[in-house]
Image: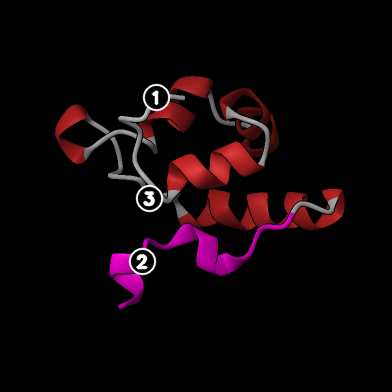
Amino acid sequence: MSENHLHPAKAVIAKLGGPEAVATVTGKHISRVYRWMYSKERGGTGGVIPQRDAEKLLAHAERQGVDLHPGDFFSKEEAA
């Protein structure tokens, strides 16, 4: 993944094994997963993972023993 990719999506995707793994878990095309890491100006979501997909990813992480928490889906700026 590029350093141009946006958080928190970049960090969540990395924890789960990369875009290919996340695409498999969510049933989304890999291009959609990459869009989560793109700015809104580039046609992405600005680093935000949609809630429905976040729920799938959290459930998968729990089953696999991956250290992932709901707070990981929010940027520090949003939390403040």
Q: Is 34 on the left or on the right of 12, as rendered?
A: left
Tell me the kind of residue under disc 3.
Val
**Residue at position x 62%, y 23% from top?**
20
**Residue at position x 76%, y 52% from top?**
66
Whole-angstrom CA distance, mark 2 to mark 3, is 12 Å
Whole-angstrom CA distance, mark 1 to mark 3, is 16 Å
Above/below status of 15 relative to 30: below
Q: Can you identify the residue that label 3 sits on?
A: 48
Counting residues from the start of the chain, the first of labels 2 and 3 encountered is: 3
Q: Specify few, some or many for label 1: CA neighbours under 10 Å numbering under 14, 14-19, or 20 or more.
A: few
- Residue 2 got which mark? 1
Question: Does residue 76 belong to the magenta stretch?
Answer: yes
Q: Specify few, some or many for label 3: CA neighbours under 10 Å numbering under 14, 14-19, or 20 or more.
A: many
Q: Is 71 on the left or on the right of 56, as rendered?
A: left
Foreground disc of the pair 1, 3:
1
In x, y percent, where is residue 53? 56, 48
As rendered, which of 41 and 50 lies closer to the eye? 41
Query: Dot 3 lies on which element?
Result: loop
**Residue at position x 23%, y 30% from top?**
43
Q: Specify few, some or many for label 2: CA neighbours under 10 Å numbering under 14, 14-19, or 20 or more.
A: few
In x, y percent, where is residue 27? 63, 32
Q: Mark 2 and 3 residues: CB-CB less than 8 Å, in contact?
A: no
Tell me the kind of residue under disc 1.
Ser
- Residue 76 got which mark? 2
Q: Kindly indicate the quadrant of the structure image that contains residue 34.
A: top left
The magenta stretch spans which residues?
67-80
Above/below status of 2 relative to 39: above
